[in-house]
Amino acid sequence: MNMWKIGCVGFGNVGQGLARILVDKREALKERYGFEYSVTFIAAPVKGSLFNPNGIDLASALAVLDKTGSLKGHPDATEKDTLSLISGNYADIITEATYTDLKTGEPGVTHIRTALDRGIHVVSTNKGPVSIALPELMELAEKNGVSYFFEGVVMSGTPTMNLAREALAGCDITGAMGIVNGTTNYILTRMEEGMPYGEALKKAQELGYAEADPTGDVEGWDAAVKVQVLAKVLMGEPIRVEDVDRTGITGITSGDIEAAAKRGARIKLIAEVRRENGILVAKVAPKEIPLTHPLAGIMNATNAITLVTDHLGEVTIVGPGAGRVETGQALLADLLSVHRSHS
């Protein structure tokens, strides 16, 4: 593939983060990886969709968006709807970064299914489709000889999936445990400093770490979806998010944190998947982590995961679990994976 045609589905923080990287790194990507691209469409019904089969000027699109908050005044503005753009054979790869709906997986499931069914590669940061339809979507990708990658769904740009797939190739991964939700880790960090739970949650909301309705984070649903992904990708066992034994942090008190400290430990919300006597254990729960373990030192909104392998023992990777450019980097890494696999 000399020139990859890319369609961007969703152009919020993550989509814009990727676009800025692509503009800044165009020459470097060509020189280092032989990766050349043309963005043929941006499907963003709220902000305004763009279409140009010869390639959209991303720098101008970002400039218009920064100035007006909309793409509707851009010269490449189009009335074509998202599914028409995906199914029109205008792109070889789509990046799917629309909002996450953990109940239905929509509209992401339909976007991804439509693309894969037409032999279009998909890279995505959307947790909803992974939670709702991962086995189906992976089977559809294999059937049509294309890739479906979703590095960003577990730890944003910190390379969990690629670490397991590439750097740890040949290892059997027998388990994983980690801090995969930055919001709860931030709250627990503030509580360790003496801040009450309610105040710590309010601070997390003010900083944009927590939503107005923080249930998905503090009750462990976000982490449970990530356990679901790890179970399928690392352990080869598809499970429902409802199968994850889930406890959030709402019951943790300052007294619990002080008691753990006296025992030489810190309380962290731990996402975990492993096998016990041949049975898969998938769990999210607050857990006392000894200060000697690498996960104990992970503070604030940072994420980390420890993969348990047969050849290397425990391998821990630490990095950001959110952010515009950070999650855009996950899409870029997956784009390059597609490029390496199919060029």
Image (spheres, grey):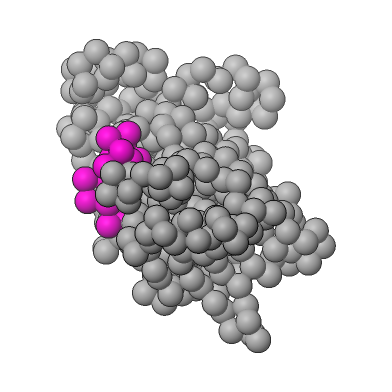
Q: Is residue 275 visible?
A: yes
Task: Reply above or below: 211 against 27.
Answer: below
| Residue drawn 57% across the image and 26% down it | 36
Name of the residue lying farthest toward the bottom: 277
Q: Is residue 160 magenta?
A: no
| Residue drawn 28% across the image and 17% down it | 66
Q: Position of residue 141 (x, y in %)?
A: 50, 59
Which corner quadrant holds the C terminus?
top right
Chain part drawn in magenta? 201-216
Name of the residue lying farthest toward the right: 311
Task: Reply above or below: 31 against 112.
Answer: above
* 3 horizontally vs 196: left or right: right
Q: Nearer the viewer, residue 132 or 335?
A: 132
* 217 horizontally vs 245: left or right: left
- Using the rendered view, name the quadrant where residue 173 is placed: bottom right
Q: Is residue 84 visible?
A: no
Q: Is residue 212 magenta?
A: yes
Q: Position of residue 263 (x, y in %)?
A: 60, 61
